[in-house]
Every structure is written in C-alpha cells, then in structure tokens.
Amino acid sequence: MNLKKIALSIILLFIIFMGGVIASVYIYPPKGVMIFEYHRVNDDTVDTDDYSLSREQFQEQLDYFKENNYHTVSMMDFIRAEKYGEELPENPIIITFDDGYEDNYTNMMPMINAMGMKATMFMATNYIGKENYVSWQQLKEMQDNNIEIGSHTANHLPLTEVENLDNEIKLSKLLMEWNGLKTIYFFSYPNGVYTKESIQCLKDNNYLAAVTGDAGYNTFKTDKYLLQRTNVSNYRFGYIGFQWRILKTKILYRLGINQH
C-alpha cells in the first residue's frame, strides 16, 4: 500500500470517527452545566471589537437558549446544588460577562431581565468608574437585578505575571465588599491563565469557584476552581458560528480534551 492510500485511509477513519462522535452528542447529549463567556453588548463597537455583540446578536442567542429549553442559573446555584443537593433546572447554563463594561448595565442587564434569566459579571475592580466601565452604584443595582458579581482581579493582569497574588485576588474581593457589594465568592482568570499558586490563593481568600477559558461541560466532579467555559465572540459566520461553538463544546467534553 503506497503512502497516498495510507493517508486516504487515515483521513477516512478520522472522518468516520468524528462522525460517530458528533452523532453521539446528539443521540446521548452530555449532562452538566455549560458556562458561556461574553464581554460586551454594544452596537457601537460590534464592527471594531471581536468581543462585542450587537443587541440583535445577543437577543438571538438568548432566544436560542429559550427555544432549546436551556435554563440560566447563577454560579451560586451551581455550587449549592453540588454542595447541598439543591435541584437545578433542566439543561442548566450560566451566562457570564468579563471586565465590567458599562454596556453590561445599559444593554445586557435589561435584556437578561426581560427574558427572566440570570447572569454573572466578573469585574476588574480598578476599572470601576472609568470611562466605558460600570460605576459603584451600577454594580449595586446589578446585584439587585439578577446579575451576580464576581472578581476578575484588580488590574486584569494574567496571573502568571503577578508577583503578589493577594494584590489582585484578595484586594479585588475586599474592595467590592468594602464598598457595599454583597460577598464576592466567584472569580474569572484574566485570559484564562491560572497557576497552582493562584488556585491556592483563591481558596485561602474564601472564593468558592473560578472559571477558565477551556470549553466543556461542568459536573459535580469538575474542579470548582477550574470550571469549563465556552467563549462567545463576534463570530465571522454569525449565528451558525455560535451554534458551532456549542457543538464544539460538546465534542471536546465527549472526547475529554482539556476537561478539569
């Protein structure tokens, strides 16, 4: 058998294998919680920022969740279900936003509330009150309107570049609590980067869980400080790209790739 036939055979076997994997996620859907990572909902930046969705795009995705019987829960809902056996709804998902842009308050929050959904926003605390970011008062209003608030460090630095982790992990939590926010229990790693030391620092400072940038499903066996999360960006192929990202998440989970 020549090399061309060997290569064709390998390709054919790969296609058959992947076809089987894809079929399996439809026939036997994964069980667990998908966490989605967003950043902005802003019509003015959608053409210049890959992390921005228009209000129309975001609404389309919220409609998809509702039409496909997904139900939003908070990070705390998930942790309480794991720790105390509290029941989660069918097909639970968690919608999260990183950084703390002001459009999370002006656009995202009203849209989430109109759908009767929940969301979590992770705040980089030294950005609070700066141009295009939320204010302290807006943060408090968000907590009172089904938007859970977590920490995204103080300065949005990858934790591999931070010498004193307490300055980013501990102080960001304390700053929000000292300014009147409810207790901060959850954390998002900037750029999805974490270390053993940063995980220990989170535990030492009474965080209950943290999210990464690794797509997949979360079960009660998933490391709570390395929760899987699927990034949602302004896809080149629009709505189809969004659906592909969900399918990719299911495939990665089924194959056990980067699952914690």
Image (cartoon, rainbow, N blue to C red):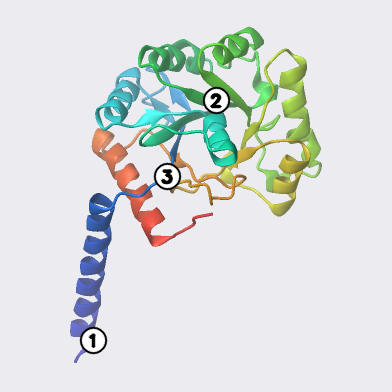
Residue at 33% over, 36% down: 235
148 vs 28, left or right, is right
Identified at 78% across, 41% down, the residue is 204
Quadrant placement of the N terminus: bottom left
What whole-number distance in Å separates the C-alpha atoms at marks 3 and 1? Answer: 43 Å
Quick check: 132 above or below 13?
above
Q: Which mark is residue 121?
A: 2
Q: Horizontal placement of 8 versus 204: left or right?
A: left
Whether label 3 touches label 2, CB < 8 Å: no
Q: Nearer the viewer, residue 122 or 81?
A: 81
Residue located beneath label 3 in the image: 32
Is label 1 in a helix, a strand or a loop?
helix
Residue 32 percent coordinates (x, y): 42, 44
Q: Relative to 10, say whether 151 is above or below.
A: above
Say which residue label 1 marks. Answer: 3
Which quadrant would the C terminus be assigned to in this image? bottom right
Tell which circle, 3 or 1, labels the residue nearer the N-terminal end.
1
Identify the residue at horizontal 74%, vertical 35% (top origin).
206
- Give the secondary structure at mark 2: strand
**Mark 3 Cα-neighbour bin, 10 Å: few <14, some 14–19, many ≥20:** some
Mark before the other along the chain sequence, 3 or 2: 3
Outermost residue toward the bottom in this view: 1
Asked whether the residues under the numbered discs 3 and 1 touch, taking CB atoms below 8 Å apart as contact, a structural biologist would say no
Q: Is residue 201 above or below residue 43?
A: below
Q: Looking at this view, is 72 or 120 the one in front?
A: 72
Which of the two discs, 3 and 1, sits closer to the camera? 3
Could you tell me how many numbered marks the image carries? 3
